[in-house]
Image (cartoon, rainbow, N blue to C red):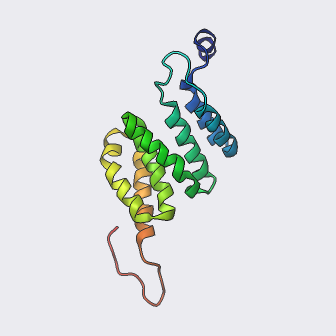
Amino acid sequence: YRRHLAESDGPTDAAWGAELELLLQEGRLLEAIERADELRNTPPTGRGAGSSAPQVVCQLAEARAHSLGGQPVNALLPALSAVALCEGRGLRGLYSSAAQLLAAAQLEVDPPAALQLLQRVRAHVMHHGSADEVARLQLAFAKCRLASLPPYSKAAPPSAQPL
């Protein structure tokens, strides 16, 4: 069906997300970053051109590739761009993913800021997110809270604090 669609309407940007996700799942991270950059500079075509928010999809893929590659600080700029695009265009469906990627990247730099961002998007994710997004949100909350705790020392063990 996709082949028929491409022949009749030209290549469609609706398939970009799946293509980038496949590269990420296969661990071809550098290739995913390069392909996302290439697609970001390609005008959307095909039936419903642009309706799949191709710019945001490319930014999210690039941020995920940096995070999966162990460079969450490099994921800050694409994640921030994705959040800004989602807010500017009212893309509520992609906003929670973008915000969670941004929070994961911020966790390395500023855990309290990451926690504040997660608190802002919590209601949206709990209401509109998939089970996977809700689980990732809870994990991100736990990581932020753990990162905010003072360092442990045997001489002065931490007092019991509710997370």
**Viewer-proximal residue, 133 or 148?**
148
Q: Position of residue 22 (x, y in %)?
A: 63, 36
Residue at figure coordinates x 48%, y 44% from the top left: 81
- Residue that extends furthest to the top in the rendered view of this protein: 8
Q: Is residue 34 visible?
A: yes
Question: Left or right: 103 with respect to 14?
Answer: left
Q: Quadrant of residue 39?
A: top right
Q: Quadrant of residue 149?
A: bottom left
Residue at figure coordinates x 34%, y 48% from the top left: 121
- Residue that extends furthest to the bottom in the rendered view of this protein: 155
Image position of 140 with respect to 31: above or below: below
Q: Position of residue 18 (x, y in %)?
A: 58, 31
**Viewer-proximal residue, 60 or 160?**
60
Q: Position of residue 108 (x, y in %)?
A: 51, 63
Residue at figure coordinates x 42%, y 84% from the top left: 157
Question: Left or right: 123 with respect to 103?
Answer: left
Image position of 20 with respect to 64: above or below: above
Q: Quadrant of the C terminus?
A: bottom left
